[in-house]
Amino acid sequence: MEYSSNNFLRSIIADDLAEGRATEVVTRFPPEPNGYLHVGHAKSICLNFGLAEHFGGRCNLRFDDTNPEKESPEYVASIQDDVSWLGFQWSGEVRYASNYFQQFYDWAVHLVEQGNAYVCDLNAEQAREYRGTLTEAGRNSPFRDRSIEENLSLLAGMKAGDFDEGSKVLRAKIDMSSPNMNLRDPILYRIRKAEHHQTGNDWCIYPTYDFAHGQEDAIEGVTHSICTLEFEDHRPLYDWLIEHLPVPSRPRQYEFGRLNLNYTVTSKRKLKQLVDDGVVEGWDDPRMPTISGMRRRGFTPRSIRKFCDMIGVSRSDGVVDVAMLEHAIRDDLNDNAPRGMCVLRPLKVVLTDYPEDQVERLVAPAHPSREDLGERELPFTRELYIDADDFRESANKKFKRLVLGKRVRLRNAYVIEADSVETDADGNVVTVYAHTLANTIGNDPEDGVKPKGVIQWVSAVTGKQATVRLYDRLFTHEAPDKGDNDFMSLVNPASLEVIEGAWIEPGLADAQPEQGFQFEREGYFVADRYEHQSDAPVFNRTIGLRDTWNNG
Ligand code: ATP
Ligand code: MG
């Protein structure tokens, strides 16, 4: 199965292969394990794995784990889960930048020996001053002309832990007046006396992203190193390092536009804040745009891959309408999810003509067009629940549901007519008394008076009670983190409504965790991955029925 449709990167790679610049295609997905993956990462995953697959190549999963303070084994594990769940298999073992720390260090020594790197003692503030601005050249650090011997000995001292954090860095010696700020003697190594989740206390200096990334690619034989546009200005540095180091291969960097979605934030830092401040229940809260959140919400891997395919890949940044993502899951579930009936706000109906102990085994197709999904049993009884919103004592003609003295069809069952109600002390209807019309399963009433509408129902005897969580978009604002907007104050206060006493048709209680359904007339729901049990069912609303994506 192919995951990524045609895009400009495919054309570039096809040309590289045709003209012999590459003989195989090796890509990588290189997350930093400092949070859970989000929908933006899904785009990068589909792209990298999709390209490798298309060209019969390989794609590595590599953790860019060069910032120990922000990383954790929990993130490492969740990222592997997410990539596998999306349906991709990385080539060989999972890789870690930290596996190459010794090699990076040796290469740092090489740069020093060649006169291409030096140890600098400027503090952060001084370094900023010396760096200049976009319109003004920088100035050489007073430490730039240290001898090779002195630099070698200072670098060894940094590695040995002789110096305090922040007191020294290793910098490449490139050009302080370059118009590209990334080439103004960029930092290659920092002192960080932090324990690392993979290498423990072996190291107290850690390479920067720029010093690590291209060299990781070269070590792994990556041919096409694909990253988002903000790294375009880093490409000259990427190339400079490959040029000045005895690396085993020559990867090349290509950039594409990152995914931004309206009504959503896609930044691990901001998502972490939502988790840390308790705005959501965790990284995999079904309202989160994380892959694990979407999974728990009821998205399927297929729908996410389809979405990534629909948005395409381009060389510019844009904002995608979240309604398109919602369309992708709705479309998938419409085609593939079995149907079921659920009553969210139960109102009791007693069918006065129906025998008290009778249980009639009605059956209905699991899906209107998918015979392969089989049938479901709908035991019918004298006492039922319908949705309170589906009944009125009196109503005008626009209300096509149950009204006193009028008829409605119970989905997959009889036509009934409402006769009277029982109310509580406050006048609220608590029970509707009705009767069935003979021979109306699959037929119109014999007297020719057809019901105007169809409503869902659940047997009060054989149905099961369930907890149903209704999720909505997490943000009320279209661009929650744009400009001066404070995304934390734009959280939708109604993003979660929990209904404890819903009723579901009996078979739904036996759903497998993560199984998705269409609850007729209500939307698409999934049995919660962690909490659903047949004796205590829990369903999450994935998405409503109404498609708001304008696809022309
Ligand atoms: P964040 O800003 O959320 O922390 P990141 O870019 O720092 O994201 P990484 O773990 O470094 O996260 O990203 C791994 C890969 O995923 C990178 O190649 C990165 O370019 C890509 N990626 C991250 N966010 C997006 C996005 N919104 N759209 C497309 N690709 C993305
Ligand atoms: Mg990053």
Image: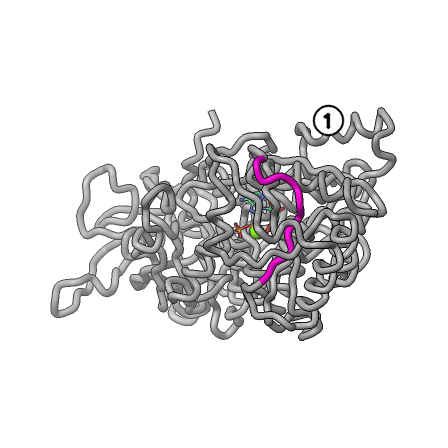
Q: Is residue 377 left or right of residue 388?
A: right
Query: Residue 354's image quarter?
Result: bottom left
Q: Nearer the viewer, residue 349 or 167?
A: 167
Q: Nearer the viewer, residue 460 or 167?
A: 167
As displayed, is residue 2 above or below residue 7? below
Give the x, y percent position of residue 374.
Answer: 63, 52
Q: Secondary structure at mark 1?
A: helix
Q: Residues within 10 Å of mark 1 (few under 14, many from 20)?
A: few
Say what amino acid the circle numbered 1 marks. Answer: Ser
Q: Nearer the viewer, residue 42 or 258?
A: 258
Query: Residue 529's image quarter?
Result: bottom right
Query: Residue 4's image quarter?
Result: top right
- Asked if the stretch drawn in magenta spans residue 176, the answer is yes
- Extreme residue toward the left, this view: 426
Give the x, y percent position of residue 202.
Answer: 71, 73
Q: Which residue is mark 1?
A: 11
Residue at x-position 50% and y-position 65% = 506
Residue at x-position 33% and y-position 54% = 491
Camera sees residue 122? yes
Q: Main secondary structure of the magenta part?
A: loop
Give the total of numbered labels.
Answer: 1
Q: Which residues are magenta?
A: 168-177
- Asked if the stretch drawn in magenta spans residue 120, the answer is no
As displayed, is residue 88 above or below residue 431? above
Q: Nearer the viewer, residue 269 or 77?
A: 269
As displayed, is residue 430 above or below residue 134? below
Camera sees residue 47? no
Give the x, y percent position of residue 336.
Answer: 59, 46
